[in-house]
Image (cartoon, grey):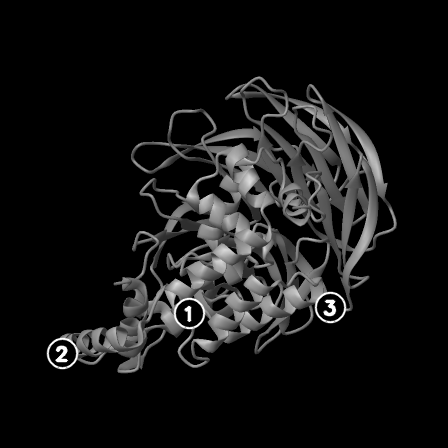
Amino acid sequence: MNKYPLIFFILYSVTLFANEKDFQSPYENKLIYQGEKGLIDFKIVDFNNDQISDIVIINYFLHSIDWLEGTPQGTYITHNITTLFESPSKFLVEDFTGDGKKDIVVSGANGLSVFIQENIYHFKRRQISESTVDCWGMEAVDIDRDNDLDLVTISQKNNTLMWHKNTDGDFQNILISDTLTKVYSLDLIDANQDDNIDLIVSSKKMDKVIIYINDALSFTPHTLCSNTFSGKTKAIDINQDGYTDIVCSPTRQSNFHIHYNLGDFSFRTDTISLEDEHLFVDINSLDIDGNGMTDLVVNDFKSNRTSLFLQYENQKFTHDTLYDYHNSHVTNLSVIDFDADADLDIILCNVFDGTIVLLENKKNNVINYFEIVYRGYKFISNNLFLVLIFLIIIIGFLFYKQNEISHSFITNNKLIKALQQKVNNQELINHRQGQAIQEIQDSNDSSLPTHGNLDHFLSELKELNPKINDIAIEYKLSKTEYRLLVFLKSGLNNYNLAELLSVSTNTIYVQRQRLKKKLKLESTKALNDFIKNL
C-alpha cells in the first residue's frame, strides 16, 4: 500500500478540526555588540582563522573600519584598521590577492579603496578609484574567469556602473554605463543561462530594473520592468526550479514584485500587496519552517521592522514581523549559522544606536507542521486529536482499498489534458500513445489515474522516443534518472513533476542536477537543449 496519499489525507483532515493561531517566531533577540552611532554595515567572517566568528564593521560618522575579534566567551576585542576613511558606506571582505588572507574593499566620500592584509593587525591601503564614490551597491565576482575576484560597483553620485578588473590586488576601472540616475541596488544573476555573470541594477529615479547581459565581457542593457518604484533587488531562486528569480522591493508604494525566471530569458511577474508603504533596504532568504520552500526576510527602513515573508504554498506568502526596533534603523542583515548549532540565525545592524542584534534560531530551523501550515493550527484537545487520528486512519484505509488511491493521487486532470494538448500540437500521436492517454482519462475524471495506469503511460512515452533508451544505456542512467528524462521530454516542468511524483520541487531540482552531471552537461540551458533535441 502506498502510504503517501493516506498520510496526506490524514494531515488534510486533521487541519479541518483545528483552530487558526498567529505565527510564532522561533527567534530570540540577543544584543551581541554595542558600538557607536553610525554603524552602517557589518560582515560576519572568521577573520583570523581561529574557528570563531569575528565581525568587521564600518562607521559612517566616525570614518572608521574595525574588526571585532570573537572570543570563546562570546565577547569581542576591537582592532581598529583606520579612522581616516571619510564616510564609508559599503564594503566587502574577500581575498583579492589570492594569498589566503582576507582583504577589505571600502567605498566612501573619497572613492574606492582596498586594504590589503599583511597580517591581522596591519593593512596596506591602495586606491582603486577616486571617482567611484558613495557606492550603493558592490559585489565581488570573477567576471572575466581568470581565477581572481573582480569588483562591480554602482555609484549614485556619479550615476555609474563600473567593473574593476583585478590583477593581483591592483584594479583596472572599466565603465559599463554612465547613463543611470539614482542607482539604488546591484546584484548578480545568470539571466540567460549561458554561464556568464549578468548584472541587475535598479534605478530609483528612472523607476526601472535593468539587466546588463554579459556577452564576452560586453554588457547590453535589457529593461526587466519599469514604473514600479523599485528599490532593493535580489536574485533568489524562489520556487526552486533551478532558475534564479528576481525580487524587487518598493520605495514609494505598498507592494513588491517577484519576477519568476522561466528559463528562456523571460519572466513572469507576481505582485505581493502590502497594507502600507515600505522601503526595503536589505533582502535575504532562508527556509524558516523547514518545508523546502524559500522564505524571505527583509529590513524595512520606513517601518523600523524586520519582516518575514513565509512561503506556505508554492509562490504564496504570508507577512509577519520578526523584529521591531522602534527608534533605530536596521540597514543590513545577514543570514548565517552564527552559533554553529546547525540552524540559520539572523543578524541585524542598527545604524542609529550602533548595535548588532542576533535573532537566534531556537527551533533548529524546523517548526512542527501544524504550527505553520496556512499560518499555523492549534489542536483543541490532545485526547480528541488521538481519537480523530484513529478514526481517520480507519476511514482512510477503507477508502484506499475501495478506490485504489495511488501515488498519482495528487495528479489532476489539468496535467493529463495539458499532456494530450502538447502531443496534439506536436503531431506525435500514434495508436499506442493515444490508447494510453485515453485509458488514463477513462479511469474516472473524479478519482484520478491509478498507479498502474501511470506506469503504463510512462512506458508508452518511452516507446514513443526509442532514442531515450539508447541514451540510458550509453550514459548508464539509473532508474530514477531514466524516468526523469522521459518525463522531461514529455514537457513536464519541475512543479508538474513534484505533484506527479509526490516529492518536493527541491527534490526534482536535485534530480535534474544529477541527471545533468550524468549526461556530462555544463549548464541548465545545455540540459534543456539536450532534451529538446532528443
Residue for point 43% across, 75% down:
443
Estimate the spatial distance between the alpha carbons at disc 1 and disc 2, rounded to whole Å: 26 Å
**Of callouts 2 and 3, which one flags the residue occurring earlier in the amino acid sequence?**
3
Most extreme residue toward the right is: 179
185, above or below 370, in the image: above
- Secondary structure of the residue carrying tag 2 is helix
Q: Closer to the camera, 332 or 398?
A: 398
Q: Identity of the amino acid at label 2?
A: Val
Residue 2 at x, y percent in the picture: 29, 62
Estimate the spatial distance between the alpha carbons at disc 3 and disc 1, rounded to whole Å: 37 Å
Q: Identity of the amino acid at label 1?
A: Ile
* Residue carrying label 3: 228
State which mark lies toward you, 2 or 3.
2
125, above or below 234, in the image: above
Q: Identity of the amino acid at label 3?
A: Thr
- Determine contact: label 2, label 3, CB under 8 Å: no
Residue 218 at x, y percent in the picture: 84, 38
* Residue carrying label 2: 387
Q: Give the left or right position of residue 372, taking residue 134 as reference.
A: left
Residue for point 44% across, 63% down:
454
Task: Give me the disc on residue 142.
Answer: none
* Residue carrying label 1: 410
Circle 1: is it few (<14), some (14-19), or many (20+) Cα within 10 Å? Answer: some
State which quarter of the image contains the N terminus.
bottom left
Q: Give the left or right position of residue 381, taking residue 3 as reference.
A: left
Residue 252 at x, y percent in the picture: 69, 70
Circle 3: is it few (<14), some (14-19), or many (20+) Cα within 10 Å? Answer: many
**Of callouts 1 and 2, which one flags the residue occurring earlier in the amino acid sequence?**
2
Would residue 287 be seen by someone viewing this image from the given angle?
yes
